[in-house]
Amino acid sequence: MTLHWLYLDLNSYFASVEQQINTQLRDKPVAIVPILTDATCAIAASYEAKAYGIKTGTMIYEAKRLCPKLICVKANHEQYVDYHHKILAEIEKYIPIEIVASIDEVACKLIGKQCQEDEARKLAKNIKKGLQKNIGECIRCSIGISPNRFLAKTASNLEKPNGLQILYTQDVPERIKHFKLSDLTGIGRALEYRLQKAGILSIEELYKIPPKHMRKLWGNVQGERFWYMLRGVEIPIDATQRRTIGHSHVLEPKLRQVDLAQQVMSRLLLKAAGRLRRLQYYTSNLNISFRTGNGLKVKGTKKFYRACDNITLLSEATKIWNDLIKKNRIRSVKKISVTLFNLKKKSELQPDLFTTEHQQQHLTKRFESLSKAMDKINSRFGRDSIALGNIPSQIQSFSGTKIAFTRIPDKKEFNE
C-alpha cells in the first residue's frame, strides 16, 4: 500500500511550449515539424490536432487531409530546452527530482509523509498549480503515483491531458487491462510482435506469465526484471557508460545535392567534435552513413590515432565521404549520420609507447588548442562566428542540434 514514486509527464510538450509563447496558436490544431514541407512527419501534435487523429509520426500531407486547418510550426529545440530547465526548477521547489527520464518526463522519490495518499495527491496538485502559475497556463502535465517508478509512469498514462492517478500494486492488472502491450515502458514493436506470436495478446495474459517464462520470451534477464516491476518491486537502474557521440539529419530537398550535403556532413561532424571536447573525450573511430535519394544506404568507417580536434576529424571524415561518393556514384543524399566511437576519457589516456612526447605535441596539441579557441569564440558570440572554411548561406541556417528521446542537449550545444 505504500507509495514511493511520483512520475510527471508533460502533455504535448513541444506543441504546448509553442502555444505558450505564441498566443495565436492556443486552442488550435498545431503540428511541430523538423522542416516546413508536406513530405515530413509531425514530431509532436497539440491536443487539438490529436483530436483529428494526428500524432507523432503522422506524415504532414496525411495530417492536412485529416485537418485542413492544421498549423505547422518548425521545431525550435533550443526553446524547448530552455523551458525544460525552467520546469525542472519549478518542480524542485516542491520535491527533489530523482531522475530526468526525457525532455518532458521526470521521476521524483516520495519520502516521509509524502508516501501517504493524501499527502501525495496534495503534492501533485501543488506542482500542477506551480507550473500553470509560474511557467505558463499552456504547460500541463499528467502525474502518476505508485509504489515503484515503472508503475508510476504507467499511472501517468491513465489520464491525459492534465491527469492525476494513483496506481497501487493490487490494482494491476485490472486498471491497466485496456492498455496495449506496447503502452508499457520496455515493450517496443518488435517485442510486442514476439509476445503476440507466443499467444500473449493482452496485459492480463502477460501478467499471468511466471518470471522464468517471461525471461525466456524476452531472451534475457530483463524479462524477469519486468515481471517484478509489473508487481511494484523497485529494480535498481544499471549505470550506463557513454559509448558514442554523434548527430544525424534528414536534409531538406534544397540541400540534397552532393556538394551541399557534404557541407551538412561537415557541420554535423564539427558539432560532434565540439561535444567530444566539452565532455573531455578522445575518439579513434569515425563512422559516416547516409541514405540516398533513391533509398540506397551506404556507410564507411575509419580508424585513426586518437583525436578530438576539428582539423583531424574533418580530414578523416572527408576521406570517408569522397570514397563513398566515388564508389557508389551518389548524386543526391537524403539523410546523413555521423558517429564518433571508441571513446576514451582524457583523464584515462595512456601515453603511446612508440610515439615521443614531441611528436604527440606536434600532431595534436596545436590542432586541439585551435579547436578549443574556436569553441570559446562560438560559445560567446554565437554558432558559426568562426568556422573552418566558408559556410554557404543555406547551411548557416542548419543547426543540427535536436532533442532525442534518450538525450537532452546541453544549452552549450546550440552554439557548437
Image: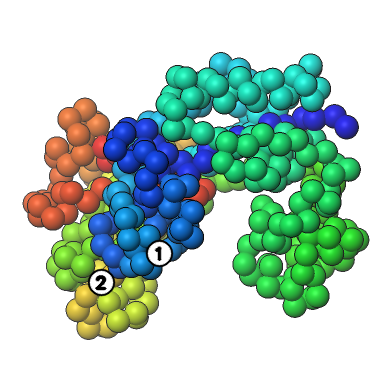
Left or right: residue 245 compared with residue 374 = right
- Dot 2 alpha-carbon crowd within 10 angstroms: few under 14, some 14 to 19, many 20 or more: many
Q: In front of the other: label 1 or label 2?
A: 1
Nearer the observer, 336 or 122: 122
Of the residues shown, which amino acid type is indicated by label 1?
Leu
Q: Report the quarter where the N terminus lies.
A: top right
Vertical placement of 172 versus 224: above or below? above
Of the residues shown, which amino acid type is indicated by label 2?
Val
Residue 53 location (% of width, % of height): 48, 60
Left or right: residue 397 compared with residue 226 = left
Residue shown at the point (18%, 71%) measured from the top left: 258
| Rendered image quadrant of residue 122 | top right
Left or right: residue 209 compared with residue 137 = right
Would you name the residue on which mark 2 appears?
A: 333
The kind of secondary structure element at disc 1 is helix
| Rendered image quadrant of residue 83 | top left
Nearer the observer, 75 or 346: 75
Residue 57 location (% of width, % of height): 45, 61
Would you name the residue on which mark 1 appears?
A: 66
